[in-house]
Image (spheres, rainbow, N blue to C red):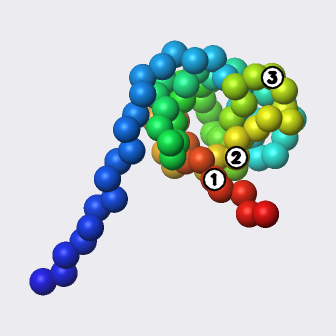
Amino acid sequence: MAVFKRESRKARHQTQLGAWLTLDGGFAKRPCTIVDLSATGARLSVQNGGKLGSKIALALTMDVRKLTPCRLVWQRGNEIGVEFVQVAG
């Protein structure tokens, strides 16, 4: 019998922190709210969610030089789940 080890979910912290998204490497910023946050990702609320690309960057300030690269994991209406991506180098 195969035994699968499920990676435990990281602790999430509820928040209502304002932030900004950039999509697919662009410079246009879209406001969002960080609904909950963990060491590995976040759940975000975005206005007019629409179709988002898989490459997203998250900024806690409007300074585009301080972006956290993310990968879109799921999207339900105006909420999305992102995973923080480690940058090589």
Query: Residue drawn at (42%, 28%), measured in percent from left and top?
Result: 13
Q: Secondary structure at mark 2?
A: strand
Instruction: Give the CA distance from mark 1 to mark 3.
Output: 20 Å
Q: Can residue 54 be seen here? A: no
Please identify the quadrant where the N terminus is shown.
bottom left
Identify which amino acid the numbered label 2 is placed on: Pro
Give the vertical position of 26 relative to 5 (above or below): above
Instruction: Give the CA distance from mark 2 to mark 1.
Output: 5 Å
Q: Which residue is mark 1?
A: 85
How many labels were placed on the picture? 3
Q: Residues within 10 Å of mark 1 (few under 14, many from 20)?
A: some
Numbered mark located on residue 69 in the image = 2
Identify which amino acid the numbered label 3 is placed on: Met
Of callouts 1 and 3, which one flags the residue occurring earlier in the amino acid sequence?
3
Callout 2–callout 1 Cβ contact below 8 Å: yes
Q: Position of residue 4 (x, y in %)?
A: 24, 71
Q: Which residue is mark 3?
A: 62
Q: Is residue 80 left or right of residue 85?
A: left
